[in-house]
Amino acid sequence: MSCPLFDLTGRKALVTGGSRGLGKAMARGFAEAGADVFISSRNADELHAAADEIRAGLKVRVEFATADMTDRAAVAQLAAEATARLGGIDILVNNAGSNNPQAIDKIVDADWDRLIELNLNSVMALTRAVAPQMKERRWGRIIHISSIMGLASKDERNAYSATKAALIGMCKATAQDLGAYGVTCNCIAPGPFLTDLPGKMLTDAQKKTFADRTALGRWGDPRELAGPALLLASDAGSYITGTVLLVDGGTLCKTF
Ligand SMILES: NC(=O)c1ccc[n+]([C@@H]2O[C@H](COP(=O)([O-])OP(=O)(O)OC[C@H]3O[C@@H](n4cnc5c(N)ncnc54)[C@H](OP(=O)(O)O)[C@@H]3O)[C@@H](O)[C@H]2O)c1
């Protein structure tokens, strides 16, 4: 029997970048807790397969739509479509994101602008679009997926760290804008989770370094982000707002 504090029955969640990796794992966690879920990304086939996986064995609705988060009109359309098809959005997880490592003296303007649009501007645009209905219902949960790279950094992570730190700043303001309406806004700062994003970007040697940097001595499994997200998305997290939940296997607790 599930714990009522973590029960999401009747709630409706929109998870961007829900086609794979951390987004899919969080969407599945919400569905297991009873929520209807809407996922988005740019790839319809991957979304279709992910939706099947997320709803497998459960009696919840899982819907999806493609939306390129670097396209402001597509972001607005996503908010409208998810709201219409689910009948509202109670939980918004701004998860879609990417990385494009470039050293400070090698930054290409178009790459910088694209990452800011995807990792930061789209989060503002989608949150702005969804917040009014949460205010009206006087209940809502907004979760931005930041990163340990928003709290510390690494060579060539200029744009990435800038966006992930900005999400933390924005979430603190949003928490104050919406707190009186029963809407919380928090960031999760994941450490190294083995998904496509680092999987394709890092060499085996770099992957080992990341694992060695954690206190647990290993990469996180994407499913290990579902519980922390559920805490912030449910009544269990009702008094948590404007903060950053570090889920990094004990990376930033190390000095040397
Ligand atoms: N994995 C980690 O170690 C780690 C650590 C800290 C923070 N994070 C953050 O966690 C989030 C999820 O990352 P992940 O590791 O799960 O990466 P992932 O496996 O590459 O998944 C990224 C998701 O975002 C979607 N996406 C990417 N660009 C998009 C765009 N322009 N428009 C719409 N959707 C887009 C992808 O689908 P399409 O490409 O098909 O559109 C996919 O669904 C990101 O914000 C990332 O920065 C990850």
Image (cartoon, rainbow, N blue to C red):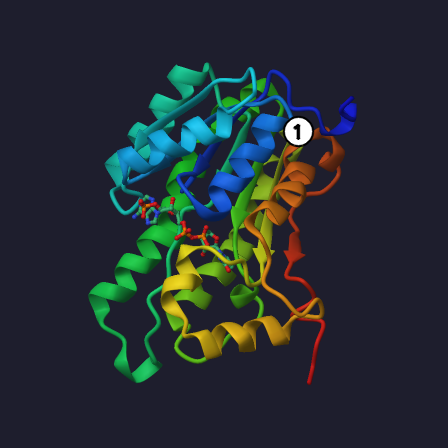
Position in image of residue 16 (x %, y %): 42, 39
Residue visible at 29% across and 84% down? 105
Q: Amino acid at mark 1?
A: Gly
Residue visible at 49% across and 22% down? 133
- Dot 1 surroundings within 10 Å: few (below 14), some, or many (20 or more)? some
Q: Quadrant of residue 106?
A: bottom left
Q: Pick the quarter of the image with the N terminus.
A: top right
Q: Secondary structure at mark 1?
A: loop
Residue visible at 40% across and 53% down? 120
Residue 89 drawn above or below residue 168: above
Q: Is residue 129 visible?
A: no
Position in image of residue 33 (x %, y %): 65, 26
- Viewed as shown, does residue 145 lie left or right of 10? left
The residue nearer to you, when weighing 137 against 229, is 229
**Mark 1, residue position:** 182
Q: Is residue 192 visible?
A: yes
